Amino acid sequence: MSEFWHDAGCAFHPVSGPDYLPVTQLRQLQLHRFQAVVKRSYDNVPLFRQRMEERGITPADFRTLEDTRLLPFTVKIDLRDTYPFGLFASPMSEIVRLHASSGTTGKPIVVAYTQEDLRVWASVMVRCFAACGLDRGDIIQNAYGYGLFTGGLGAHYGAEALGATVIPISGGNTDRQIMLMKDFGATAICCTPSYFLRIVERAPELGVDLRKLPLKAGVFGAEPWTEEMRKRIEPEANIKAYDIYGLSEIIGPGVANECCEQHGLHIFEDHFYPEIIDPKTLEPVPDGTEGELVLTTLSKQAMPMIRYRTRDITALFTEACPCGRTVRRMRRISRRSDDMFIIRGVNVYPSQIEEALLAVEGTAPHYQIVLTNDGTMDDVEVHVEVTPEVFGDTISVMENLQKKLSASIERIINIRVKLRLVEPNSIQRSEGKAKRVLDMRKK
């Protein structure tokens, strides 16, 4: 594969490829694929056909990309209501793989792939890794979980298709992660940002200085994270931390990825058509306006998703990226419309708390938001770890830090919350997605 790639400054990219299509040609390709996937869903997915008929439209009414707004939305509950195979557009004889969510709250979300779907998935993951400057000869340690979760196998087959060497270590066993990273000379790691923080924290205890290893890139996803978190991660390991985006319902990881500019994630629009809608009116909003991301799979065979409401809040950039890619970028996902909680009438997102905490020196990037209710009113308390240096200092230093953190939070969310400083390593670490919010409210 490497013969088709060349080094353009800080990122490898194809000499010619879908990321660099002229916009008019890209829009023509999107329309062609959109029309095909609408017809495929209409012909093979009863729920989609029923909703089209309720609207009095057929695939023939979809003539331009502006006609997208005529189509019904798909939401997560649709996947649960049709569990397990009700949204499949391909017969089981063509399904070669199934993935599923953990199913901790009822039935899991089931997704399916044909052989062609897996080829597309690997190809978009190649483009993700290439955007991070990775190529054949790199050694990629894959610490995403394998199994029904899409992260592990999605990254694995993409890295192999790139021509890189893959270390399929999966998640957990942090000491072994660090040993193999050092002994095998890993140049990149794939995992959640919160788990990489655990690696950063543990490495010095094992006598390993991550900054002296060949490691140069981290491909972090599966949970929202902030720019402040990136600023903490990069100098600790002397790497560039790249944001990758995806969701199982669409394909898994590989829907979008940052390039070397690290200013927004390029959406691979030839396979995933993005829209931004107002989550209240459900109407499309102009590029550059914040709203909820809606995605349509343009090439998925086994289980097409038409106008899937991701609940992720972002905005689309239309200005040209210095890397040369013509596919649009989206602002990094730092919050979801369904992770908001309301305290004393104010809408609060966990990402706002993280931004406030990491803006103050003396704290570790580990925190937990505890929601409680005294029977009449919801309340919130933030537990945040301090660094060992601060924890071992005087009471006045701790009190001063607590005041600074409280003020920083109040400045961002406009309400005062309870804040507790806790000792280092007292907040439980995660080997996968971090559990930032502990909801103790009486249901």
Image: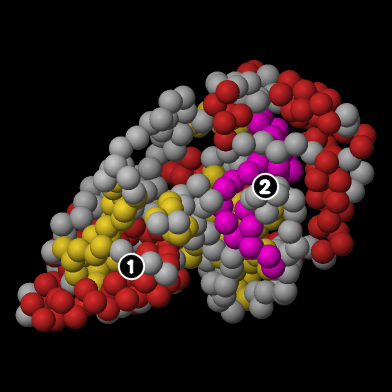
- Disc 2 residue type (three-letter): Leu
Residue at x-position 57% and y-position 35%:
76
Q: Please tell me whether residue 32 belongs to the stretch shown in magenta.
A: no
Quadrant of the image containing the C terminus: top left
Residue that carries the numbered disc 2 in the rendered image: 295
Q: Secondary structure at mark 2?
A: strand
In x, y percent, where is residue 233? 35, 70
Q: Which residue is mark 1?
A: 416
Q: Position of residue 41 (x, y in %)?
A: 76, 29
Above or below 347: residue 170: above
Q: Residue at x 57, y 56 (%)?
A: 313
**As rendered, which of 342 and 32 lies closer to the eye?**
342
The label on residue 106 is none
Tell me how far mark 2 sits from mark 1, CA to CA.
37 Å
- Residue range of the region highlighted in magenta in the rendering: 288-314
* In the image, residue 303 lies in the stretch drawn in magenta: yes
Decide if residue 192 is on the left or right side of residue 424: right
Q: Nearer the viewer, residue 33 or 117?
A: 33
14 over 157 or under it: above or below? below
> Quadrant of residue 114 in the image?
top right
Answer yes or no: is residue 350 visible: yes
Give percent across and percent down for residue 153: 47, 41
**Left or right of 113, for residue 404:** left
Is the residue marked by circle 2 packed among few (<14), some (14-19), or many (20+) residues within 10 Å? many
